[in-house]
Image: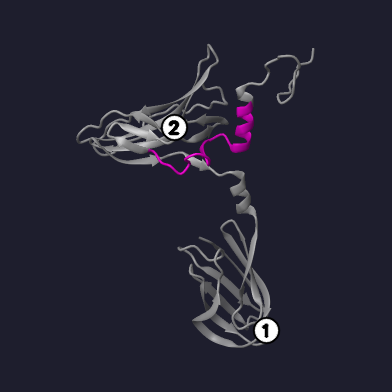
């Protein structure tokens, strides 16, 4: 007799053929096999120290290897007190466990104590087995608690936020704009995809500029296309002969300066690429 391999379809009668692992595999294929905070409830919240022995984990929605974890309300996890003159790094994890006898799967929040050290504390070991690969215990690190003596000095969030498809779509959708070319009646076309902006144009110069050096111009790069604070927008223009050759530099405020040479009537190609804020 042939075996019915279909999951998302009826097998007839009351055959309970759909299991949690089937949904988990589908979710893992779409979202990835890692562990993430979902961008739903309280996703901007961070773990905090309630007192010297309790860390509050936000009411997060999480996913790990396709399995959804729902923390209904902020939850305190107890850690052991620190020791005078010693530093320590504890990890708080979401621990997946499978009871191989009953088949019951659970997730609990657990604190794993690090080894105290006077100078160089290290993270404790965790269960790193793959749930999809058959591990019956697997830990998703949520945060690291840093202690110096009996004081909690900081808490590091260790799990990343999963960006939803709408955000990914926005990051891949081209947005167009333009900036007027100095010494011309034409515009440079700007196209932004995500944080990357490209500039291109083929323009005619309407007046000369000769051997200018970082001269401010009136044209301004529009908001949404300006470079990030640690970079600049760079656009180069040149004609076939090389007689007209210049650079336009843009700042995070959108201001531009011109450096180079151009002559009336020259046809100039312009190109550039930079990262926005």
Compared across the picture, whether 49 is left or right of 246 comes to: left
Q: Which mark is residue 73?
A: 2
Q: Nearer the viewer, residue 214 or 164?
A: 164
Q: Which residues are magenta?
A: 23-47
Q: Which mark is residue 266?
A: 1
Element on which disc 2 rests: loop
The percent position of residue 275, horizontal first and vertical second, equals 54, 61
Compared across the picture, whether 170 is left or right of 87 comes to: right
Residue lying farthest left? 84
**From the viewer's perspective, is residue 234 above or below residue 110?**
below
Q: CA distance from mark 1 to mark 2?
A: 67 Å
| Residue 44 among those drawn in magenta | yes
| Residue 142 among those drawn in magenta | no
Element on which disc 1 rests: loop
Query: Dividing the picture into quarters, in which one does residue 265 lie?
Result: bottom right
Point out the frontmost of discs 1 and 2.
2
Assess disc 2: are there few (<14), some (14-19) or many (≥20) residues with their C-alpha within 10 Å of its C-alpha. few
Assess disc 1: are there few (<14), some (14-19) or many (≥20) residues with their C-alpha within 10 Å of its C-alpha. some
């Amino acid at each position: 007799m042939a075996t019915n391999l279909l999951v998302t379809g009826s097998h007839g009668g009351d055959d309970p053929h759909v299991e949690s692992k089937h949904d988990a595999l589908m979710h893992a294929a779409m979202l990835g096999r890692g562990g993430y905070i979902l961008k739903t409830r309280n996703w901007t919240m961070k773990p905090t120290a309630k007192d010297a022995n309790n860390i509050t984990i936000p009411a997060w929605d999480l996913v790990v290897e396709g399995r959804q974890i729902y923390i209904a309300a902020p939850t305190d996890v107890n850690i052991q007190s620190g020791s005078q003159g010693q530093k320590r790094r504890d990890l708080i994890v979401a621990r997946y466990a499978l009871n191989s006898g009953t088949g019951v799967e659970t997730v609990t929040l657990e604190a794993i104590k690090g080894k105290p050290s006077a100078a160089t504390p290290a993270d404790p070991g965790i269960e790193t087995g793959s749930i999809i690969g058959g591990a019956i215990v697997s830990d998703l690190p949520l945060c690291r608690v840093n202690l110096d003596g009996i004081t909690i000095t900081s808490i590091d969030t260790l799990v990343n936020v999963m960006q939803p498809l709408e955000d990914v779509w926005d990051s891949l959708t081209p947005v167009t704009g333009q900036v007027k070319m100095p010494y011309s009646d034409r515009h440079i076309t700007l196209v932004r995809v995500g944080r990357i902006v490209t500039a291109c144009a083929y323009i005619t110069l309407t007046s000369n500029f000769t051997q200018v050096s970082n001269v401010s111009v009136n044209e301004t790069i529009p908001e949404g296309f300006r470079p990030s604070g640690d970079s600049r927008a760079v656009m180069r223009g040149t004609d076939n002969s090389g007689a007209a050759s210049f650079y336009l530099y843009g700042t995070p405020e959108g201001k531009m300066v011109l450096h180079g040479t151009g002559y009336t009537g020259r046809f100039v190609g312009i190109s550039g690429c930079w990262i926005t804020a």
